[in-house]
Image: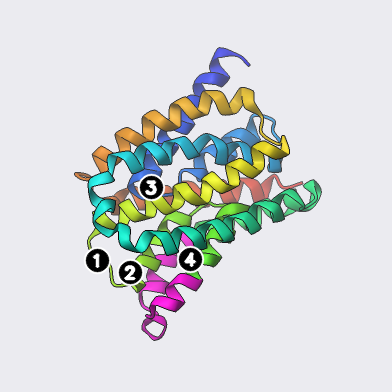
């Protein structure tokens, strides 16, 4: 790996980790960067998940004062997240490489739509405002997170709205913890499978940790909406690129 490639991977992971702590959507940077660097779609997806996960831990540490206030609800949500992510990660590993490559543009499009409009749709679905329904939604989010994962942060914020949360920093804190759990399960499965490209992951992990910790501190002062708009633009641009260059 050359210096220029290492710097690009570091920068993508640092910015991705920071974006995840503020508004979510860091995968829209790391996944395409790895694919453009020559990794296969499954390798890029797996390596991106492994690279960004430590960043979620550093963000959770920065948010510890916020999520400790709501730790009574965490055990049930963590269990649900573990079950869903396990199923999603194994589904990814058993998806043929060619099939996943064909799915990539569609997955990016779905993720871009979810990230941009999912929060608005779920938050206005008043007829499903029930704790049991919210937990069922979290199970689906966790499955999607284990399989692909782009945009899960914004979906979890919407799920927490269904549970009655309104304070953005407390929601961000819980979202960060649950996202860390979802990715931790996927990381364990991916590492055990031998699918991680470590030469890229090692560089990106350092960047994601730095970006995630710094981003969590900045998030308390930065309005998340402009960041979400920027991530949406990146997401649709990347989606268009992969549709134009699909296999």
Q: Which residue is mark 4?
A: 138
Q: Which residues are magenta?
A: 113-136
133 inside magenta stretch: yes
Q: Residues within 10 Å of mark 3 (few under 14, many from 20)?
A: few
Q: Residues within 10 Å of mark 4 (few under 14, many from 20)?
A: many
For the residues bearing labels 3 and 1, Cβ distance under 8 angstroms: no
Question: Which of 65 and 98 lies nearest the eye of the viewer?
Answer: 65
**x, y percentage for residue 60?**
35, 43
Q: Is residue 44 visible in this depiction of the protein?
A: no
Q: Is residue 167 visible in this depiction of the protein?
A: yes
Numbered circle sitting on residue 166: 1
Q: Quadrant of the N terminus?
A: top right
Q: Secondary structure at mark 1?
A: loop
**x, y percentage for residue 94?**
77, 52
91 inside magenta stretch: no
For the residues bearing labels 2 and 1, Cβ distance under 8 angstroms: yes
Q: Secondary structure at mark 4?
A: helix
Q: Quadrant of residue 61?
A: top left
Q: Which residue is mark 3?
A: 230
Q: Secondary structure at mark 2?
A: helix
Distance of label 1 from label 4 (alpha carbons): 17 Å
For the residues bearing labels 1 and 4, Cβ distance under 8 angstroms: no
Q: Is residue 217 above or below residue 197?
A: below
């Amino acid at each position: 790996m050359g210096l220029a490639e290492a710097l690009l991977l570091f920068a993508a992971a640092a910015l991705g980790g920071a974006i995840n702590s503020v508004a979510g959507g860091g995968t829209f940077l790391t996944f395409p960067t790895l694919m453009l660097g020559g990794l296969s779609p499954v390798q890029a997806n797996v390596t991106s998940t492994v690279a960004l996960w430590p960043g979620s831990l550093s963000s959770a540490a920065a948010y510890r004062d916020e999520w400790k206030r709501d730790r009574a609800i965490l055990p049930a949500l963590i269990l649900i997240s573990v079950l869903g992510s396990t199923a999603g990660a194994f589904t990814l590993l058993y998806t043929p490489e060619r099939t996943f490559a064909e799915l990539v543009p569609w997955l990016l499009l779905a993720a871009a739509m979810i990230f941009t409009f999912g929060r608005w749709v779920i938050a206005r679905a008043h007829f499903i405002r029930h704790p049991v329904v919210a937990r069922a939604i979290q199970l689906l989010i966790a499955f999607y997170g284990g399989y692909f994962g782009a945009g899960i942060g914004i979906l979890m914020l919407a799920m927490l709205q269904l549970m009655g949360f309104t304070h953005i920093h407390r929601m961000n804190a819980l979202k960060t913890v649950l996202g860390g759990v979802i990715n931790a399960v996927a990381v364990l499965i991916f590492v055990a499978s031998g699918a991680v490209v470590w030469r890229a992951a090692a560089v990106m992990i350092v960047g994601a940790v730095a970006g995630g910790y710094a981003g969590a501190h900045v998030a308390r002062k930065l309005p998340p909406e402009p960041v979400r708009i920027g991530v949406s633009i990146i997401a649709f641009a990347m989606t268009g690129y992969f549709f134009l260059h699909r296999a």
